Amino acid sequence: QVQLVESGGGLVQAGGSLRISCAASGRSFSSYAMGWFRQAPGKEREFVAVISWSGENTYYTDSVEGRFTISRDNAKNTVYLQMNSLKPEDTAVYYCAASAISLTANVAEYDYWGQGTQVTVSS
């Protein structure tokens, strides 16, 4: 069992930056790939980024490539999402999730989820 708690969300102006974190507790955090997803009001949850268990490999959705960076610190059981050049369309609740399958963007292949943190980008 893995428990995930996101933090660091907030309100930021367009063009600004924000870093959100996800702290994990429980067993074997370092054996899971960690992903970030987001869900805007009235929309389905969508994939944002994923990082392999070792941190060596990452994968991003096209809309955030070059603006967002996912990273992890296995010693601290924490995964991060650094978000730069934020746009109003990035506004959503951001969720972290853990998967036993490496580098998957499929929401159905994630086993554990956090409660989410709100990110709001004003224009």
Image (cartoon, rainbow, N blue to C red):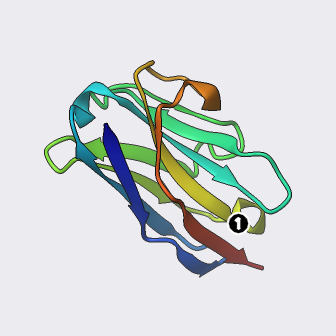
Quadrant holding the N terminus = top left
Residue 26 drawn at (x, y percent): 23, 43
Judging depth in this view, the residue of 122 and 43 nearest the camera is 43
Judging depth in this view, the residue of 24 and 38 nearest the camera is 24
Image-quadrant location for residue 52: top left
Q: Is residue 57 left or right of residue 24?
A: right
Query: Can you identify the residue that label 1 sits on?
Result: 91
- Point out the residue furthest to the top here: 101
Residue 81 drawn at (x, y percent): 45, 53
- Can see residue 14? no
Amino acid type, mark 1:
Thr
Residue occupying image coordinates x 27% and y 25%? 31
Residue 60 drawn above or below residue 108:
below
Q: What secondary structure is marked by label 1?
A: loop
Residue occupying image coordinates x 68% and y 74%? 121
Residue 74 drawn at (x, y percent): 20, 40
Image-quadrant location for residue 62: top right
Residue 92 drawn at (x, y percent): 69, 62
Q: Is residue 80 left or right of residue 91?
A: left
Judging depth in this view, the residue of 62 and 94 nearest the camera is 94
- Point out the residue furthest to the front here: 1
Residue occupying image coordinates x 49% and y 34%? 50
